[in-house]
Image (cartoon, grey):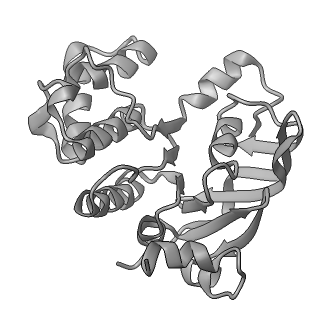
């Protein structure tokens, strides 16, 4: 499938010289990265390379030791807490474990963020928004079910729907295909592309699944030794003899 084009003159996230250490453990060592409007950008890297740390810095859950980070034209580490909360409403975070409330039905899971953040909505407006989002992820029929009754792939889709219900401008996907069977992985990849197309989101997709990276990424950024060493299309990133990159490809596609 041909990847959707994006606006390479409008940056929605801008990161320059980002450093983050935990004691003597240097995770990010001068990271530079831009996310453009309408783009799906895949961030690849082995476990422990700092992918999740980067995401937490973007939403202000962690503070960088040095460097500049700008999200939707706001400097994340310089704004007030109130401004940060408002910014977070424009940045949707799809958690690896879907993070659904087990004691709530699917409907209630989607209603919760909407009612909490948009208190002026009528019951009819809430119902319409919930049904529209469930329809968008192909799971309207699950509206009255409990999370425990759903498959892993369905829970992942509901998690994405709950994130989308606030209509964020930016989506952050943390390991969207982790723990899923190959067929369900393909369905989630397709859904990420549909979200980009239908809701005009700009997204960062954190993964070590190269099939996912190839399917959804306009560009791929590979985090190695605390910096993005490879950046470009999937083909550009993996067209190399770099011994740090080749085993990553071989593990996904040859073994």
Which of the two residues, 88 or 158, is positioned nearer the viewer here?
Answer: 158
Left or right side of 89 for 143: left
> Where is residue 19 shown, x and y percent of the image?
86, 45
In the displayed orientation, state which residue is furthest to the left.
Answer: 141
Q: Residue at x 39, y 38 (%)?
A: 164
Check the image and report above or below for 222 versus 204. below
Q: How many marks?
A: 0
Instruction: Pick whichever, 217 or 201, lies toward us.
Output: 217
Residue 158 relative to residue 48: left or right: left
**Image position, residue 17 (x, y; %):** 88, 52
The extreme front residue here reads 255
Q: Residue at x 34, y 17 (%)?
A: 112
Direction from residue 194 to residue 6 in the image, left or right: right
Residue 73 in sight: no
Quadrant in the picture for residue 26: top right
Q: Quadrant of the C terminus?
A: bottom left
**Rendered image quadrant of residue 73:** top right
* Quadrant assignment for the N terminus: bottom left
Relative to 53, does residue 206 appear above or below in the rendering?
below
- Horizontal and vertical percent position of residue 254: 44, 81
Residue 237 in view in this figure? yes
At x 39%, y 79%, the residue is 2
Along the line of sight, the residue nearer the viewer: 250 or 210:
250
């Amino acid at each position: 499938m041909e990847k959707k084009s994006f606006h390479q003159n409008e940056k929605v996230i801008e990161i320059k010289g980002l450093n983050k250490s935990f004691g003597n453990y240097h995770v990010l060592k001068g990271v530079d990265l831009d996310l453009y409007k309408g783009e799906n950008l895949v961030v690849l890297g082995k476990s422990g390379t700092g992918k999740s740390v980067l995401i937490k810095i973007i939403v202000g859950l962690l503070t960088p030791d040095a460097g500049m980070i700008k999200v939707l034209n706001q400097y994340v580490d310089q704004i007030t807490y109130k401004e940060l909360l408002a910014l977070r409403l424009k940045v949707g975070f799809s958690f690896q474990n879907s993070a659904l409330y087990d004691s709530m039905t699917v409907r209630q899971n989607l209603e919760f963020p909407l009612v909490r953040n948009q208190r002026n909505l009528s019951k009819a407006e809430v119902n319409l928004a919930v049904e529209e989002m469930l329809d968008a992820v192909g799971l309207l029929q699950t509206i009255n079910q409990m999370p425990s009754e759903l498959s892993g792939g369905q829970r992942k889709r509901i998690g994405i729907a709950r994130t989308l219900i606030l209509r964020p401008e930016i989506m952050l996907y943390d390991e969207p295909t982790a723990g899923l069977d190959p067929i369900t992985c393909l369905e989630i990849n397709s859904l990420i592309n549909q979200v980009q197309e239908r809701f005009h989101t700009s997204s960062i997709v954190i993964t070590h699944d190269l099939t996912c990276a190839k399917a959804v990424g306009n560009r791929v950024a590979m985090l190695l030794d605390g910096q993005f060493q490879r950046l470009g299309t999937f083909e550009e990133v993996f067209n190399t003899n770099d011994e740090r990159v080749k085993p990553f490809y071989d593990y996904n596609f040859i073994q």
